[in-house]
Amino acid sequence: EFDGSGDYVTLPHNSTGISGSSAMTMEAWIKPMDKYASCSSCSGRQGIFTQWKTTPGGDNIGLMVRIVPSGQINLCTNAGSCPYNSDDAVEWDTWSHIAVVFDEGEFTFYINGSENGTATAPATSIGTDSTRSSIGIGQYPGLNHYMGSIADVRIWTEARSADDISNNMYATLDDSEENLVGLWLLNEGGGIVATDSSTTGADGSVVGSSGVTPPWRDECFADGGLETVLTC
């Protein structure tokens, strides 16, 4: 569980290879907490998955998926352009499945397996100028930290269809899935490693707000499966 002030997962940068890609899908289960008043670093925007620059400026940056105070899923792309939101909001303090599909400049949002808005990006491929990849944080530590729970983060190098997303959102996947290049279940329950269960094997490092204590909720992982996580 991310506390909104110092918890996040840092990933090997661009280990998924989505920089420069013309097709990509990002999925995750999220349970955001409606506690902005105690989330000093959120600034009302909380990072879910980020592949971005650690310094300002640039026109060919990358991808940042966030939740904003309205509860909508927000997307930042090249040149720091962030006007793209899902049509509807997710519920606070409730598990929701989200997905963002990119296909040659066209974005489609999904919430709980249903299409929830589209947008046209200023470029037909993901920017290549990013320098950092992470889960549960914005551009860099100290900015746009996420408050709540995140599970089963998936990155694909393909534009997943609506059926692909809705039919597999509850499934526990493994490295046999074609074009699945990142799969962080976040179900370890302890330690400082967030295992990547895809063939990429890009394990992340868990950073706790104290600098040493990872933000696991041990009671959520008795069986290690997604269904167990979503009851917490």
Image: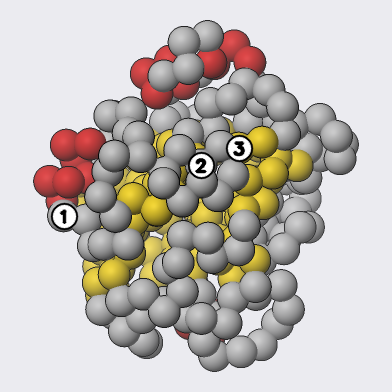
Q: CA distance from mark 2 to mark 1?
A: 23 Å
Viewer-nearest of discs 3 and 1: 3
Residue type, label 2: Asp
Q: Which residue is mark 3?
A: 194
Residue type at mark 3 is: Ala
Measured in 3D between alpha carbons, the distance from the residue under mark 3 to the one under mark 2, in whole angstroms, is 7 Å
Residue 186 horizontal/vertical position (percent): 54, 33
Residue at label 1? 161
Q: Amino acid at mark 1?
A: Ser
Is residue 133 visible to us here? yes
Residue closest to the eye, 158 or 46:
158
Please report whichever mark, 2 or 1, sits nearer to the chain's N-terminal start. Answer: 1
Q: Is residue 148 visible?
A: no
Q: Which residue occupies the foreground of this view, 92 or 19? A: 19
Q: Is residue 221 above or below residue 65?
A: above
Rendered residue at 62%/57% (across/down): 12
Residue at 38%, 64% (x, y): give it.
85
Residue 31, position in %: x, y? Answer: 49, 34
